Image (cartoon, helix red, strand yellow):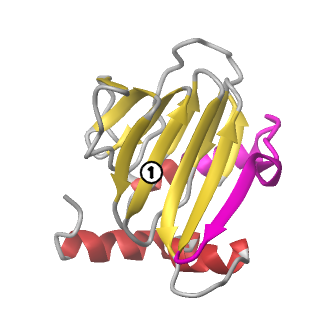
Amino acid sequence: MLVVPNPTKQANPPMFLTIRDSTQSLVPPTGTMSPTEMPCPTLPQLDRLHKALEASNVPKLDLDAHTTHHFCRGMYARELRIPAGYVVVGKMHASENFFLLVSGEVTISTRDGMRRLIGPILAVTKPGDKRVAYAHTDVVMFNFHTRADDTEDPEILETRYVVPAEEEHRALAYLTERRLLV
């Protein structure tokens, strides 16, 4: 995952950064979701954006310092805290799981285009989903995964729940061919 600040510090930055995601099963009335007019770009477009951001001199957020891992029997929760003004480029999800925006306001990619979300909102992430988000305020979000064993090593867990970057295009083609992306 790559996290960079919005260099312009605009309240409503141009949102050209999106890719597949799911914010279906939203739970009203606690959360707010308003659509924008921006469509989702392709995975190659996101790849170019990711490479450009990595090559830039824009300061990057220390993700380890902003991520907390929570465990209980059979479950794993990954908590991410994003400060206001940062752009986050996530990783492709390998399996279905819950996504919870606990607090804050974020513009995030969905399968239907960009959406401005105000927490709390609960959504379902599908295999092949990949988020790009801009934090308008400080944001707290979680992904929840089932766990078949007692593994608490985040690196091992990531291999189970995330599609490796070099496999993203192949995974997306597989899911699309089998009509598993709706």
**In this rendering, position of residue 100 left or right of residue 36:** right
Camera sees residue 163: no
Can residue 121 be seen at all in this image of the molecule?
yes
Q: Residue at x 61, y 70 (%)?
A: 72
Q: Look at the numbered disc 1 and give the secondary structure of its residue.
A: strand
Q: Amino acid at mark 1?
A: Phe
Q: Is residue 26 left or right of residue 150?
A: left
Q: Which residue is mark 1?
A: 99
**Outermost front residue:** 73
**As drawn, is 10 to the left or to the right of 154?**
left
Furthest toward the top, the residue is: 11
Q: Position of residue 102 (x, y in %)?
A: 53, 37
Estimate the x, y position of residue 111 in percent, counting from the top left: 29, 46
Count numbered badges in the picture. 1
Quarter of the image where one finds residue 126: bottom left
Q: Position of residue 33 (x, y in %)?
A: 33, 26
* Quadrant location of the N terminus in the rendered image: bottom right
Compared to residue 106, the image places residue 110 above or below, namely below
Where 9 falls versus 119 (above or below)?
Answer: above
Quarter the C terminus occupies: bottom left
Residue placed most toward the observer, 160 or 90: 160
Is 52 drawn above or below residue 134 in the view shown? Answer: below
Please state the extent of the stretch shown in magenta in the rendering. Answer: 49-74
Question: Which residue is at 40% across, 71% downward?
Answer: 95
Q: Quadrant of residue 73?
A: bottom right
In this view, the residue in front, 148 or 48, is: 148
Taking the spot 58% from the left edge, 60% from the top edge, the residue there is 77
Residue 111 shown left or right of residue 14 in the figure: left
